[in-house]
Amino acid sequence: MRRVLFNLMAWTIVLVTAFPLLWMVLTSIKPQFELFRMPPTFWPEQITFEHYARLLWETPFLTYMRNSLVLSFSTTVLVVAVATLGAHSLVRFRYPGRERLAQLVLFTYLLPSVVLILPLYLLMVWLGIANSLLSLVIAYTSFALPYALWLLRSFMQGIPDDLESAALVDGATRMEAFVDVILPQALPGIISTCLFTFILSWNEYLYALVLVNTDEARPLTTGVMSMLVSAFNIEWSLLMAASVMMSVPLIIIFAFLQKYLTRGFGAGGVKG
Amino acid sequence: MSAAEVTFCKVRKAFGNAVAVRELDLAIGAGEFVSLLGPSGCGKTTSLRMLAGLEFPTSGTISIGGRVVNDVAPGKRDVAMVFQSYALYPHMTVGENIAYPLKKQGMARGEREAQVKRIAAMLKLEALLDRKPRQLSGGQQQRVALGRALVRSPKVFLLDEPLSNLDAKLRAHMRAELIELHRQLGRTFVYVTHDQLEAMTMSDRIAVMEGGELRQFAPPREVYDRPANLFVASFIGTPPMNIVHGEFNGRVFRHPAITVPFQVAGAPTRVALGVRPEDVLLGAGPFRATVRVVEPTGHETIVMLEAEGAALTARAPAESHLRPGEIVPFALRADRLHLFDATTELRLEARATEEISA
Ligand SMILES: Nc1ncnc2c1ncn2[C@@H]1O[C@H](COP(=O)(O)OP(=O)(O)OP(=O)(O)O)[C@@H](O)[C@H]1O
Ligand SMILES: [Mg+2]
């Protein structure tokens, strides 16, 4: 009885959460004239992919998509590379100010982005890279990295020191020990960090709005908004089609990485 | 390659203000089996980690095979270590774990597999080669850890309490296997333990440590029969040696309950008499004590006595019928008594002059 009740509740929550998504998909395949009909139709009477076609061939959507992919992948690779090495250093090496450093890193994460955005913009202009994907990679890294460092640091603290020591005695160099032993152990943490960074970069809006104002470097978030939403008109069908396509990469990545998230927690290598 | 001697020369290790090892001088011969024995926190693991290159000495030098290795990376020292925690790589199978050191040496795959097979046969791990460490029992994991060390035949083996988490039966079995292994391989073994039985049964020599300092370095028999100081005397042996504080007038040790004449040159007045429980002979003799506790263990009975404020422990035969409160006469085996300076705690080279004396 309780199970039934529990299941019922779970499904209700799923439906409530999923409804807007479903509505988004349905709207994107309804013909224009069916959109504003009163009362609204739930299932489309006629299915059309014209919005998708228009989006793909008649707008800079694909450029935005490419920008977003490049941007999110670069940020993720950069953040994860720096954060794994940095977290390892914070956990394993002893040097003055190590704890202080770790706390400072978290402190930067606490600053609201509106506070950082102007200085960052001026910095980018000064560096001569404003209005480029690179400036966004740097900006996203600046706020994804602190969190990534903390996430990975706590993961790496759970890896016994002896594992690395054993690898060193077994003839590995420091880098080899890191790659052979630490990385596989930290894999679930690394994948969580990848997901976190990727989603953050994919959905980021504010920085993209301020730092970039050419179509060549605009990511999907600001690109789609400026293209389809204006003060006079919102292109609902196109917007919904764009939203659907924007979600696809995230869904693919989740499907691909999900199994790694739960796997690989290497318990039992060290007793006690 | 063969066994190598290991030398610690004035080695000191401090973690901030805490000194873990102080002025350690230790010369271990090639092919010797040496145990580092001492209570928890006395610096055994730290010493071993310094020898492996995982910890940097604050001062002093460490050499292996005559070469100073202070600046040599762990992987280049040609030592193998079994960690107290086993430290098996969780994401690798047993076979991959054992093969890992060979892989790092750049050995070809075929040869690696042959070596792993050889070790697996020796440690009876053949059936487990494809398992992950977490699918093994504690004893199996420990054999894998040993295998990963043995596969390489390094100059020196370092073992950090490798048997501490095993049950008594498996421990006795592994003890025998390690002795046999050492005999076969003829390599230098440095074995850390706080179990004196392990140290006594396996070692050529025992290094007894306390508070980061070396207290005695001698063969097991000598550590037991001629402890160099009060710490070693009371640390080695179960039940521990009885220590009776008393006075010495140049000829006779005096305690209200016990007097023993000694022949010793230049002894201080404040001394401590050491008597092993098996050297307290109950039933007859010049001294008297009250029985406090009787503990039959099966093959013998441990008797706690009190004689004029001195607590004594005696080993008695299993069939003795002593009762608490009873007053028993006892004697001491004069040729097995130890005398220590009560202030320096060092052993005095003394011999009791009579068998048993009033
Ligand atoms: N990384 C470290 N940082 C600070 N102090 C340490 C560190 N490692 C060891 N110590 C200290 O050094 C002393 C010796 O430690 P060590 O681990 O060598 O003891 P041990 O003899 O191996 O003890 P046990 O039998 O419990 O394993 C201890 O007081 C310990 O607290
Ligand atoms: Mg230890």
Image (cartoon, coloured by chain):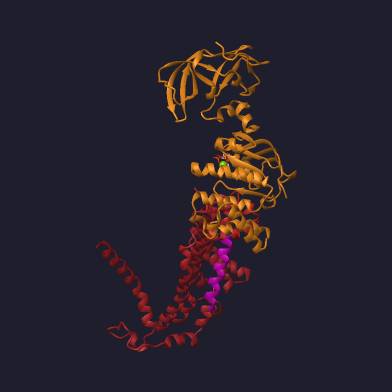
Chain colours: A red, B orange
Prevailing secondary structure class for the magenta stretch in the rendered image: helix
The furthest residue to the right: B66
Magenta stretch contains residue A68? yes
Judged left or right of residue B13, residue A19 is left
| Residue B179 pos. (x, y %) | 61, 42
Q: Is residue A106 visible?
A: no
**Residue closest to the eye, B354 or B268:** B354
**Residue closest to the eye, A22 or B52:** B52
**Residue closest to the eye, A222 or B310:** B310
* Residue A86 versus residue B190 in the image, above or below: below
* Residue A257 versus residue A26 in the image, above or below: above
Magenta stretch contains residue A41? no
| Residue B344 pos. (x, y %) | 62, 23
The furthest residue to the left: A1
Total marks shown come to 0
**Residue closest to the eye, B269 or A26:** B269
| Residue B332 pos. (x, y %) | 55, 18
Q: Quadrant of the N terminus of chain A?
A: bottom left
**Ligand 2 is in which quadrant of the figure?**
top right
* Residue A95 versus residue B232 in the image, above or below: below
| Residue A237 pos. (x, y %) | 40, 83
Q: Which residues are magenta?
A: A66-84
Judged left or right of residue B347, residue B288 is left
Q: Is residue A46 visible?
A: yes
